[in-house]
Image (cartoon, helix red, strand yellow):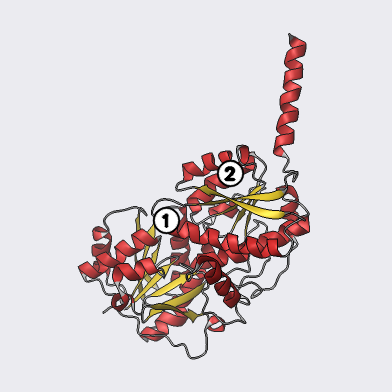
């Protein structure tokens, strides 16, 4: 009986080891694309994956990756817990070789941890929470900007764009910071407060709310009493739209409104109307109206998108996902493998200048495997369209900043 137990134990260990090693015996490289494809954020999860699909088309047309065609397999993830179960399903049922994602930081947090249990690479393109890279997981790499880049760009936009437009000095400029309460919004808001106070601004309030809240009346009333010159909001589309509607209903009219990470979608335009959105600023992923020098290939991306999906992009997150996926392919190619033990050192050696990819990204990873050559831009609603207005290198000739106040 002891011999059988020993043999069974050895077989289990051997089987586990074989399962844990990310071999590429399959005819294709299977990549699990984790995003919300159902629920209120499905439109944006799908948009991110469209970026992956276009990058896959480009790579496969050029002969594939490591001599194999890439096969994308979607995994629908709408919440953090589902991230764990979906990873398990894609590994055990679909035999994926690695993962790429995602639109939501909370999902990335749990899904990447679950991927580590199977020794699978998790390449993050869009989730921005600081905590994701600060964990230093041995399977995690982020090619897109992190929360500090959101905080840096939004704070710089206040100092270099908004304050001059309002003819105000940063010293004493009154700012209300509002954010959704997950690690995504919280980490960005904390950094914004720190940076803006260092610039001399007066933070008159910091508010937080659940992304799925159904009322922001109290938040808006508190902000209204504080009489801010600038209101900054970090969140998602549903809570951002609700905040703007509530501001309009309650008569909150700061001299400038700056949204971070959202506020630039057709859904928001439809919900609030072009007249109300006119002048609102949004810090987000670079759009297709940036200069070719800033984002080489961004026009080609737009043409490929239109040809494949018969429409214009819903949001700029897709082009960032596309750029990040191409960076991932460079790291995997350099590693000769999708094994995270090999891909992380290969990624650490990448030295690709900024303004190489369509979103303006380059590739240089720090000790936490955070790409430090990926930044955001700021755009403004003008006549029902988003127009890039910051930084100067990304702005097309003839573009000027419109008045910032609410109607």
Q: Which residue is mark 1?
A: 41
Q: Which residue is rendered at x = 65% and y = 57% of the image?
A: 369
Mark 2 secondary-structure assignment: helix
Alpha carbons under labels 2 and 1: distance apart: 22 Å
Dot 2 or dot 1: first in sequence order is 1
Q: Please identify the quadrant where the N terminus is shown.
A: top right
Q: Which residue is mark 2?
A: 113
Total numbered circles = 2
Q: Which residue is rendered at x = 42% and y = 65% of the image?
A: 262
Mark 1 secondary-structure assignment: loop
Q: Position of residue 51 (x, y in %)?
A: 56, 63
Q: Position of residue 41 (x, y in %)?
A: 42, 56
Q: Position of residue 81 (x, y in %)?
A: 47, 41
Q: Position of residue 147 (x, y in %)?
A: 51, 62
> Is residue 392 depicted above or below 240 in this figure?
below
Q: Is residue 99 left or right of residue 187?
A: right
């Amino acid at each position: 009986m002891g011999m059988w137990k020993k043999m069974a134990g050895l077989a289990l260990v051997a089987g586990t080891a074989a399962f844990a090693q990310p071999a590429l015996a399959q005819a294709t490289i299977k990549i699990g694309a984790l995003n919300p494809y159902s629920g209120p954020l499905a439109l944006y999860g799908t948009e991110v994956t469209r970026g992956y699909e276009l990058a896959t088309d480009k790579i496969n047309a050029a002969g594939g990756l490591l001599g194999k065609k890439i096969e994308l397999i979607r995994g629908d993830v709408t919440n953090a817990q589902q991230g764990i179960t979906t990873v398990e399903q894609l590994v055990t049922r679909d035999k994926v070789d690695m993962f790429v994602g995602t639109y939501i930081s909370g999902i990335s947090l749990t899904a990447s941890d679950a991927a580590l249990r199977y020794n699978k690479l998790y390449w993050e393109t869009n989730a921005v929470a600081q905590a994701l890279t600060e964990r230093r997981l041995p399977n995690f790499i982020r090619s897109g900007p992190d929360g500090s880049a959101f905080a840096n760009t939004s704070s710089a936009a206040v100092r270099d764009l908004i304050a001059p437009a309002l003819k105000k000095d940063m010293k004493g400029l009154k700012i209300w910071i509002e954010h959704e309460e997950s690690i995504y919004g919280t980490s960005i808001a904390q950094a914004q407060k720190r940076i803006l106070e260092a610039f001399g601004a007066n933070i008159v309030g910091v508010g937080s709310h659940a992304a799925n809240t159904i009322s922001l009346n109290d938040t808006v009333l508190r902000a209204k009493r504080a009489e801010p010159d600038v209101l900054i909001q970090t969140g998602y589309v549903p809570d951002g739209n609700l905040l703007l509607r509530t501001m309009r209903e309650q008569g909150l009219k700061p001299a400038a409104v700056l949204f971070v990470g959202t506020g630039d979608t057709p859904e928001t335009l439809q919900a609030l109307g072009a007249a109300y959105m006119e002048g609102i600023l949004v810090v987000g992923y670079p759009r297709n109206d940036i200069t070719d020098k800033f984002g080489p290939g961004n026009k080609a991306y737009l043409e490929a998108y239109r040809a494949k999906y018969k429409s214009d992009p819903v949001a700029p997150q897709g082009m960032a996902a596309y750029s990040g996926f191409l960076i991932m392919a460079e790291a995997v190619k350099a590693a000769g493998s999708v094994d995270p033990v090999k891909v992380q050192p290969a990624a650490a050696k990448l030295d690709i200048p900024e303004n190489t990819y369509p979103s303006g990204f380059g590739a240089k990873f720090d000790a936490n495997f955070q790409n430090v050559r990926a930044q955001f831009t700021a755009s403004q609603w003008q006549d029902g369209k988003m127009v890039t207005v910051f930084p100067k290198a990304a702005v097309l000739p003839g573009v000027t900043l419109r008045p910032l106040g609410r109607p």
